[in-house]
Image: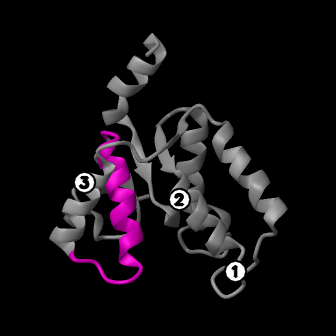
Amino acid sequence: MSSGERTLMSKKSLWRGIDTNILVYFLNEESIYHPRARVFIDKLQKGEIQGAISWQNLAELYAIVTDHKRFPKPMTASQMVETTKQFLESDNIKVILPIANTKEVFFNLVLKIRPKAQQIHDIFLAATLLANGITQIVSEDRHFPKLGLAVIKI
């Protein structure tokens, strides 16, 4: 492991997970949350704060913003790829992956919460964040504290 990787890992506690809803609000100019999401993303891009997203977030974002039933002005696949690349270009937005102990955290949360249907996605996101040492999430959802994450609202 390089010294840069060790530094990143030791500073993970300073990083905040980003819930997919924040990314959706940022892209949806009609959302009442858009202005606050824009300020948050601007702070991320300027390096004032550091955020972590998972590939799960990006897949969920794609599913929402390309669906005319869920997004007011659906994006095309090409638009979404370019938007995703822009998010990923920032040194202050890191993409995290499930790691070895994610499965233990995931199974423990499933047994504790007993999620139904779509709730499983937030359980898996929480497990991925927690396994990576991230204990805060920026979200407008209220259920993450039950999953062991402190919620920071935009």
Specify few, some or many for label 1: CA neighbours under 10 Å numbering under 14, 14-19, or 20 or more.
Answer: some
Element carrying mark 3: helix
Residue 75 numbered mark, or none:
none
Q: Which residue is mark 1?
A: 67
Q: Spatial distance from mark 3 to mark 1, Cα to Cα? A: 31 Å
Q: Does residue 69 sit above or below 125 in this rendering?
A: below
Image quarter of residue 58: bottom right
Residue 151: x percent and y percent? Answer: 31, 57
Element carrying mark 1: loop
- Of mark 1 and mark 2, the one earlier in the sequence is 2
Q: Which residue is mark 3?
A: 105
Which label sits in the foreground, 2 or 3?
3
Q: Which residue is mark 2?
A: 57
Question: In the rendered structure, which segment of residues is drawn in magenta?
Answer: 114-133
In the rendered image, the quadrant that contains the C terminus is bottom left
The residue closer to the viewer here, 49 or 93, is: 93
Left or right of 82 on screen, residue 2: left
Left or right of 79 on screen, residue 20: left
Q: Spatial distance from mark 1 to mark 2, Cα to Cα? A: 16 Å
